[in-house]
Amino acid sequence: MNFLEERILKDGIVKEGNVLKVDSFLNHQMDIELLDRIGEEFYNRFKDKNITKVLTIEASGIAIACFVAKYFNVPLVFAKKSKSVNIDGDMYVAEIESFTHNCKNQVIVSQKFLNNDDHLLIIDDFLANGCALQGLISISENAGATIEGIGIVIEKGFQIGGKVIRNLGYHLESLAIVESMDASTSTVIFRDQGGNG
Ligand code: 5GP
């Protein structure tokens, strides 16, 4: 079991509706030491790629991606959620359905900050159905950037996102993959990633 899986077992809370709450160390209160280890772990997994920028989505992804960007010594760009339909010029736009908030958001990135020279590492906190990632992938493709890899902190392996993204051919690394969880017994079972988890 890796450091993140241990922490999820210790402090994660399984909620009804397939939601894992990790707000005591990742999504609300943040354990900075843990974020630093996460940043280092993603660096180790992707250091052979020529990463020029880290891309994430607000809000929870930002803090994690900061540490990743620090290890790679590259800028971090985050997609902003925007309710406005009249996005003025020069923006890459994608529509994303939110798993946790059950609504649709437009997400935007200024064209100033992504272009076809970029080699991206996409980072997010959770992977569930993959909508957030699909939005970031679409924005990256619109920019003509190369997606070198995708790093997820917690993948919920019983939802479709991981399968879809891997089938598209992306190099996706998840630090913990939840195989199953049960709110009534507060149990979380992880996928065995062969020592790499
Ligand atoms: P997806 O777009 O893959 O369906 O969902 C990913 C997004 O939904 C993540 O960025 C994360 O913010 C949120 N999310 C999905 N599942 C969970 C969950 O079980 N717990 C928490 N805290 N957030 C989740």
Image: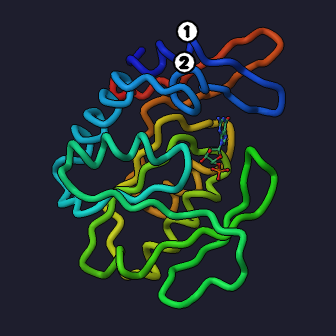
- The residue nearer to you, when weighing 155 against 36, is 36
Q: Determine the secondary structure under disc 1.
A: helix
Q: Position of residue 108 (x, y in %)?
A: 55, 72
Q: Which residue is mark 1?
A: 10
- Where disc 2 sits, the SS reads helix
Instruction: Judge from the rendering whether residue 86 lies leftward or rightward of residue 69; answer left or right.
Output: right
- Which percent across, then down, holds residue 24? 58, 20
Residue 16: quadrant of the picture: top right
Colour scheme employed for the rendering of this structure = rainbow
Residue 154 pos. (x, y %): 53, 34
Contact between marks 1 and 2 (CB within 8 A): the answer is yes
The residue drawn where x is 45% and y is 55% is 56
Q: Quadrant of the N terminus?
A: top left
Q: Confirm if mark 2 falls within 8 A of ligand 1.
A: no
Q: Please say if 161 is above or below 51.
A: above
Pointer 2 residue: 8
Up/down of 27 relative to 94, above or below: above
Give amino acid for label 2.
Ile
* Residue at 55% across, 9% down: 10
